[in-house]
Image (cartoon, rainbow, N blue to C red):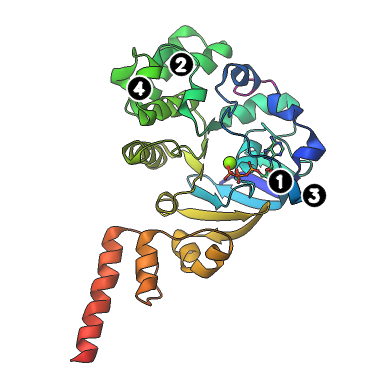
Amino acid sequence: MDEIIRFDNVVYSYAAAGESQETMSGPGGGGAAESGRSADGHRQPEPDAGAGGTPALDGVTLSVRRGETVAVLGHNGSGKSTLVRMLNGLLTPLSGTVTVCGIGTGEEDRLLEVRQKVGLVFQNPDNQIVATVVEEDVAFALENLGVPPAEIRERVDAALRDVGMVEYREHAPHRLSGGQKQRVAIAGALAMDPLVLALDEPTAMLDPRGRGEVMETVRRLNRERGVTVVMVTHHMNEAALCGRVVVMDRGRIRLDGTPEDVFLRADELRALGLGVPQTVALARGLGLDAAPLTDEDCARVIFDFVRGGASAGG
Ligand SMILES: Nc1ncnc2c1ncn2[C@@H]1O[C@H](COP(=O)(O)OP(=O)(O)OP(=O)(O)O)[C@@H](O)[C@H]1O
Ligand SMILES: [Mg+2]
C-alpha cells in the first residue's frame, strides 16, 4: 500500500482548540518554532468576523500516495494552511484522524516519527532562518536531535546538493536572494530525510526568478528523490505543474483531480474565487473545451483550432 497520508473526516476549529497547539513543543516543531524555523511567523489570517465558529477544517477526507505532487488551492481563509499544519502534527484534529504512514498525528509518543517523515516549509524565508551561516542553518534541526556530527555533515552536504546551494554553504543566509533563502529552508527540511515535503505558499514572497528556482527544486526532488510534495499556492501555473490539484473552500475539499480535470471546471473555480492558468483562459476564450497546461500545449490547441477553422471555411 503506497498511501502515505490519510485524512479521515477531519474537523478543526481554532476557537474550539485554543491556540496553545501552535506553540506545541517537539523536534521540528516547538524547539525550532521558538527560534523561528517552523513557526510560520508570517501574517496570521484574522479570524473571520462573521464566521460564527465556522471550523477551519470541516470534514476533510484526503489520501495522498507516495510520490504524488499535490497542489492545494483555495481563496484566503479556506483552510489551506490549517491543512498543511495537520500534516506533521503541528495541529491535531478536533475530530477525525490524520495518519502519516499509518501513524496517527495525535499519538504524542510518536510525534517525533511523524515530524521526521513530513518536513514543512513556510512562506516567508526570513522567518525560517535561524543561523548566521547557511550550513549551520541546515544543520539546526539535526543538532537539536543530537545526530552525530559526522552524520550531520553528510546529511547537510547532501541536502545542500539537492537544492543546488552547495557553493553557498559558508555564506550568510540573510544576504541570499529570496529564492536562495527558500532553497536553504527546503534543505533544512530535507536534512531530516523526510518522505513528504509540505510547503505553504513557498513562492509567495519571491520574484518570478525565485519562484522558478523553488518550483524547479521541488519538482526535481520529487522526480529524482521520490519526495512526495504537498504545496499550497495561489499561482495557477504552479498548480498546473503538479500531478494533482485539490481545491478548498470553507474548510472543505471541493475539487480534487488532475490539473486538466480541475481547470476544465473554470466556472466552478470562478465561483470559488479562483481563476485558471492563462493558457487555459486563452483556450476558453476561443471557445475550446480544452485545458492546455503548458505554452506548447496551448500553441498546439490554438494551431489545431486555426487549422480546423481554415479547412472548415475553405
Ligand atoms: N491562528 C488562528 N487563530 C484563529 N483563527 C485562525 C488562525 N489561523 C487561521 N484561522 C482561521 O481559520 C480559517 C482557515 O485559515 P487558514 O489559515 O487555514 O486559511 P488559508 O486557506 O491558508 O488562507 P490564506 O490563503 O489567507 O493563507 C480562517 O477562517 C482563518 O481566519
Ligand atoms: Mg495560508
Asked whether mark 3 lies closer than 8 Å to ligand 1, one says no
- Marks 1 and 3 sit apart, C-alpha to C-alpha, by 8 Å
Front-lying residue, 303 or 10: 303
Q: Do the residues labelled 4 and 3 touch (CB within 8 Å)?
A: no
Asked whether mark 4 lies closer than 8 Å to ligand 2, one says no
| Residue shown at 41% from the left, 55% from the top | 240
Identify the amino acid type marked 2: Asp
Q: Report the magenta residues as a range.
A: 25-29
Say which element carries label 3. Answer: loop
**Looking at the image, which residue sits at the far front?**
49
Say which element carries label 2. Answer: helix
| Residue indicated by mark 4 | 176
Residue 283 among magenta residues: no
* 310 w.r.t. 97: above or below: below
Q: Is residue 140 left or right of residue 5?
A: left
Q: Which of marks 4 and 3 is nearer the N terminus?
A: 3
| Residue indicated by mark 3 | 52
Residue 48 circle label: 1
